Every structure is written in structure tokens, then in C-alpha cells.
Image: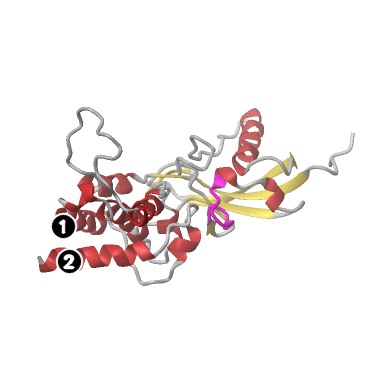
């Protein structure tokens, strides 16, 4: 039988392997054979892991959950770009037809001081949770569900808030930023609530608390490279960073 089917690809994977946070890491090379172009990137890694397990090698550790581009768990840098570089695409939505037979693919974890490596391609992104816990919510009555028309919201405001709410918290903005900044993530959460009447009561407290949490977690500062917007799989716009800055100044002046 032929080693190579015309409808499949053979690839060379250079994967970052690291046993733990304090262990040294390095790129190791594996062959991915008979890869269907219809596979997702994670399905390809699943098959590679099956081969590794059969040969007595530890499988490549990587995060995943929904595999539908919703949860943001599939955090990988593919060929130097967060999520592989396709516009508005997470790693789980990246298909192998984007590659060519014989390609070498480099796969690494998010690289940021605030995201310590847990193992291989898995990083600890709990710093984003810390930012949300500091103020990314409203303190409101949680009893019976209010009527949807009880608070009238202009459509432009609702659309603006929904655009910000598209953020899935994957951390690609941090991985793409040369400073390791989480300003795009934080600003999306601040802007979402700042645009709605339910969020205005705590707006000043929120923006200060979330900004302080951002700095305390070890993220870098924003210097307007716009790599965050380019890397974001949901297309979150840097206009929300401007909104965060305006909210911060407004809170400081009041």
C-alpha cells in the first residue's frame, strides 16, 4: 500500500514540550501522516497523540472544550501567530486545508508573563478570571426575570454592547501583543457594561477595580500596536480600549 494518499498530507510538527511550570521546555519534532485536509487542527493533534501513546510517548497536552469557536480554550500559537492567523478563527476552527503537503508547523503556547505554562501547550489563564472577579459584573437583583422591555435601550447602544460582549476570553490579544497586555480583553468587558443602563451605577468603581487588577496580574501596558485586534478570533475592535480610557478619566474627574 502506498505510504501517501493523494487526498491526504504528511506534515512535520515542531511542538513545544514542557513537563511543568518550573521544568525546562523545548521544541520536539513529530510526524503527522495521512492528515485529511477536512480535519480541524485539534483533530489532527488528536490523531498525533494516539500515535504517540501507542509508541509510549506522553501525548501533547493542549486545552480544548467546545471545539466550536465559542469557549476560547484552544489557545495555541501556530507558526508564530495566535490561533494560526486566519481572520476571526480559533484553533479549533482552523482546518488542515490551510496547509500544504510537506509543511513544517510550529506549535507553541501563549507567551506572556501573566500566563505561566502548566504543561506543553497549556497555560494558566486565571489572571483573566481575576480581572472579571474584580468588577466585570453588575450588583443587581437576581430574583424573577424582568420583562425584556422594562428598560428601554437604544439599538445603537445595544449593538455596541453586543459587539464588546463577543469577547470569549481566550487571551489571544495578550499572546499577540508584544507587551503582553490584556487591555483589549479588559476594555471589552468595561465597555459592554458602560454602554448599558444596568452598568452605569457602578461604572466608576468597576473601571478602577478592573484596571488595578489588570496591572496587578502582571500584564504589560498598551502601546497601540493593534496586534490584539488582529489576533482576536472574534474581531474585538480597539475602539473599546479608547472607551476604557474615557471611562477611567471620567471616573477620576468625578
**Range of residues picked out in magenta:** 82-91
Contact between labelled residues 2 and 1, with CB atoms less than 8 Å apart: yes
- Given residues 60 and 163, the one toward you in this image is 163
Tell me: 149 left or right of 122: left
**Residue 215, label in figure:** none
Mark 1 or mark 2: name the one nearer the start of the chain.
1
Q: Residue at x 17, y 34 (%)?
A: 141
Query: Residue 217: x, y in percent?
Result: 26, 54
Would residue 86 be counted in the magenta stretch? Answer: yes
Instruction: Name the main secondary structure of what is drawn in magenta.
Output: loop
- Given residues 163 and 80, the one toward you in this image is 163
Rendered-image quadrant of the C terminus: bottom left
Quadrant of res 56: top right
Q: Residue at x 82, y 42 (%)?
A: 7
Query: Is disc 2 placed on a helix, strand or loop?
Result: helix
Q: Residue at x 45, y 40 (%)?
A: 71
**Residue 204, label in figure:** 1
- Given residues 131 and 179, the one toward you in this image is 131
Q: Residues within 10 Å of mark 1 (few under 14, many from 20)?
A: some
Query: Residue 67: x, y in percent?
Result: 54, 37
Quadrant of res 229: bottom left
Tell me: 150 left or right of 238: left
Query: Residue 39: x, y in percent?
Result: 68, 40
Would residue 100 be counted in the magenta stretch? Answer: no
Can the viewer see residue 120 in this picture? Answer: yes
Can the viewer see residue 221 in this picture? Answer: no
**Residue 250, label in figure:** 2
Q: CA distance from mark 1 to mark 2?
A: 8 Å
Amino acid at each position: 500500500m502506498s505510504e501517501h494518499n493523494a487526498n491526504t498530507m504528511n506534515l512535520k510538527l515542531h511542538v513545544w514540550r514542557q513537563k511543568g511550570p518550573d521544568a525546562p521546555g523545548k521544541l520536539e519534532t513529530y510526524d503527522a501522516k495521512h492528515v485529511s485536509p477536512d480535519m480541524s487542527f485539534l483533530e489532527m493533534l488528536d490523531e498525533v497523540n494516539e500515535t504517540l501513546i501507542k509508541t509510549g510517548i506522553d501525548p501533547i497536552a493542549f486545552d480544548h472544550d467546545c471545539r466550536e469557536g465559542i469557549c476560547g480554550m484552544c489557545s495555541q500559537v501556530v507558526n508564530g501567530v495566535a490561533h494560526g492567523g486566519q481572520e476571526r478563527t480559533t484553533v479549533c476552527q482552523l482546518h488542515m486545508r490551510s496547509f500544504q503537503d510537506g509543511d513544517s508547523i510550529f506549535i507553541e503556547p501563549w507567551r506572556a508573563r501573566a500566563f505561566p505554562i502548566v504543561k506543553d501547550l497549556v497555560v494558566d489563564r486565571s489572571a483573566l478570571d481575576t480581572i472579571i472577579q474584580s468588577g466585570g459584573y453588575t450588583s443587581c437583583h437576581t430574583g424573577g426575570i424582568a420583562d425584556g422591555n422594562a428598560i428601554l435601550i437604544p439599538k445603537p447602544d445595544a449593538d455596541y454592547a453586543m459587539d464588546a460582549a463577543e469577547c470569549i476570553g481566550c487571551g489571544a490579544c495578550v499572546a499577540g501583543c508584544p507587551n503582553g497586555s490584556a487591555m483589549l480583553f479588559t476594555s471589552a468587558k468595561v465597555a459592554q457594561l458602560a454602554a448599558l443602563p444596568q452598568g452605569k451605577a457602578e461604572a466608576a468603581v468597576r473601571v478602577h477595580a478592573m484596571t488595578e487588577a489588570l496591572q496587578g496580574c502582571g500584564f504589560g501596558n498598551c502601546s497601540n500596536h493593534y496586534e490584539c485586534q488582529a489576533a482576536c478570533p472574534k474581531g474585538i475592535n480597539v475602539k473599546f480600549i479608547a472607551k476604557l480610557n474615557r471611562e477611567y478619566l471620567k471616573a477620576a474627574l468625578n
